[in-house]
Amino acid sequence: LESKYLKPSINISPPKWPRDRYVTLGEAFHFAACVRRIGKVATHSKNQISSGAEEEDVELSQTMFMNDMNEAEEARKNLPKRQDQDLLSAWRALSCCDGLCGAPLGRSLNDCNDGTISWLCTTLTFGGQIVVEAAEKRLASVEITSPDKKRTVVEPSDFDTRPNGYAKLETSDKTVFPIPIPKVVSKLDEMLKGQSAATNLVQRELEFCIGMLDYIVTRLSSAQTSELYTTNSSLQLPCGAFKKLHCGHNNQFSAEERSRLQEILTKSSLLRGQSHV
């Protein structure tokens, strides 16, 4: 079940921060291929589970790739039936991985490799603003006594964009909130160490995805990112300030979104020496 994007002779390692300042094009495509293959194998694994296990579905149909029936048949032959659930759990975590910019990783597969690479680039470009803003809100109510109090220190909890009480809102497995990247890394690493026969089928792919997601967390949590994406300086960046909206295509902005937009416009005017109207 080898993907045409992932041959046995190719040995690409995920980037490491701060040694690697950027993700190369080859690493990005390799990440997309790994995610695609894990989704493909998990889809065939799901087909072996009885119809009574519908509660474990996480829209795996979006990763149904029917272009190569030989791969599909080979997957059914090789996948252990009793340990399918391990692979589905791994894919559940990976597909629900929060990209911090409005879309989970699994949704990006609708646009094939380009969608996954776009997810990766967007997360690395704008994700820092999200986590730093969350860290600033967390620290605003805490008295900081450390000598490094001027720097915003990012913690794993700052990657969690889920609302308070989200567990009660998840009334079914088809209504889930995106999972923070650090929790996805922890979950996948735990399952990989479990040496399940099912997850061993995609061991290399899981290892690379864990490495790439860990790179994202380390990079966005670094002191350099914190300094770069502080609330006061984000407007001065070439990429500008990012704000994730929840209004959909036609609805009005929420009160919080209008307040944030006004704040961005005000700071933008002050930076340019203009009066705000």
Image: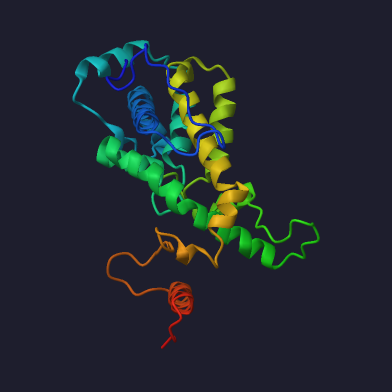
Which is nearer the eye, 234 or 45?
A: 234
Is residue 164 visible to us here?
no
**Residue lying at 54% horizontally and 47% vertically, measured from the top left:** 220
Choose between 80 and 220: the one closer to the eye: 220
Could you say which quadrant of the image residue 37 lies in?
Answer: top left
* Vertical side of 244 occupied by 267: above or below: below
Name above or below for residue 93 compared with residue 78: below
Q: Nearer the viewer, residue 179 or 264?
A: 264
Q: Which color scheme does this rendered protein use?
A: rainbow
Which quadrant would the N terminus be assigned to in this image?
A: top left
- Say left or right for 94 vs 39: right
Q: Is residue 125 left or right of residue 158?
A: left
- Relative to 4, residue 266 above or below: below
Q: Relative to 192, is 125 above or below?
A: below
Name the residue rendered at 50%, 57% in the picture. Answer: 129
As drawn, the residue found furthest toward the front would be: 273
Location of residue 65 (image quadrant): top left
In x, y percent, where is residue 67? Answer: 18, 25
Query: Which quadrant: the C terminus?
Result: bottom left
**Would you say 260 lies left or right of 152 here?**
left
Does the rendering let one see residue 258? Answer: yes
Residue 110 on image: x %, y %: 27, 41
Identify the residue at image location x=49%, y=14%. 197
Give residue 160's position: percent from left, percent from top.
56, 52
- Residue 174 screen position, x and y as percent: 40, 46
Instruction: Report the label total.
Output: 0
Furthest residue in direction right, as rendered: 145
Look at 45% across and 60% down and name the residue there. 237
